[in-house]
Amino acid sequence: MSKFLLFLILTMSAFVSAANQDVLIGSGEWSPYAGAKLKGLGFLNDVVTIAFEQEGITAKFEFKPWARIEVETGNGYFLASPGWSIQEDRKAQYLFSKKPIIVSRSVFIERTDSQFDWKIMSDLKQFTIGSNRADYYVKALTEIGVKVQELNEYPQGIKMLIAKRFDAFIVNEAVGRKLMRDLSAEEQAKIQIHPLAYDENFSFLMFSKNYPNVEAFVEKYDSGFDKMQKSGLYQTMVQDLYKGKYD
């Protein structure tokens, strides 16, 4: 048997074994993107589920704190986890989907009666910005001299913004819009999203290099995701995300 033929047989065997089976996906809570009680388990998990379904694979989910999810994905307990950025220090342990599950914006929520405005990063130094302490904004803004008030919970940030405890609250746009929908009509009228986004975020499906046959699963997911985009299903799901259908 030629080496090339052997290679083809092994490759095809990997793809066959990757289909028609269950895989375990790790997720934390991050509404409306991920949550055990959300529609479709949240937008990110819904996309992952459907992408694998396109290829005959059933995705099952376990919910744990995000820090544990990262560790247990790395050691191969989970095949993958959604919502991660590609960073150099992760490339040794993980593979990533070809395309991001979502490209989202980070935005500032401000009071409608405030003087908050900015065009370049240095403009932010005159303001106090609220941020969830777990988000990367805290370090990024502090390093350029912006005063940041750290918070434990996202809803706390919105309440403190309305109470004028700081000038603006920085948050992922879909998360922020969900927080705003949870407010009373009177509270909603007091705040708005500033039109200039802070940055864009590329959130990928992160795969464990220690999971058996992982390369075949990456290709299967990528293929399923491409099918979702070509059919228009993915675009509809993104619209649903921002309309609040994953709350």
Image (tube, rainbow, N blue to C red):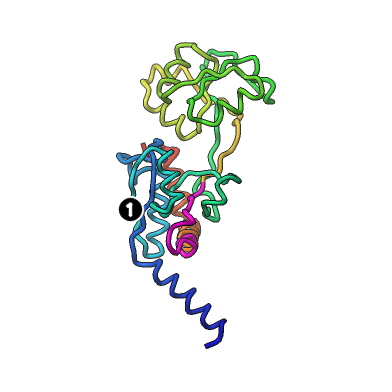
CA neighbours of label 1 inside 10 A, class few (<14), some (14 to 19), many (20+): few
205 vs 199, nearest the viewer? 205
Tag count = 1
Task: Measuring from the top left, give residue 146's x and y in whole percent.
Answer: 62, 19
Q: In which quarter of the image is the C terminus?
A: top left
Residue that extends furthest to the top in the rendered view of this protein: 164
Residue for point 47% across, 65% down? 216
Question: Which SS class for mark 1?
Answer: strand
- Residue furthest front as drawn: 75
On the rendered structure, is 124 left or right of 209? Answer: right
Q: Is residue 43 covered in magenta? A: no
224 up-or-down from 12: above or below: above
Picture layout, residue 100 above or below residue 139: below
Q: Nearer the viewer, residue 163 or 144?
A: 144
State the extent of the magenta-drawn residues as a range.
Answer: 204-218
Residue ID for mark 1: 60
Q: Is residue 144 left or right of residue 99?
A: right
Q: Does the magenta stretch include residue 211?
A: yes
**Residue 211 in sight here:** yes
Residue 198 image point, x, y percent:
60, 30
User: Is 180 placed left or right of 117 in the picture?
Assistant: left
How far across and down, in percent of the image, does residue 16 sit? 41, 72
Vertically, is 237 above or below 119?
below
Q: Is residue 231 visible?
A: no
Which of the pair 194/108 is nearer the observer?
A: 108
Identify the residue shown where x is 46% and y is 57%.
210
Q: What residue type is labelled 1?
A: Lys
Image quarter of residue 106: top right
Q: Which residue lies furthest to the left in this view?
A: 37
Give residue 177's position: percent from left, percent from top: 45, 30
In the image, 182 versus 69, the foreground residue is: 69
Residue sitting at 57 percent across and 15 percent down?
Answer: 128
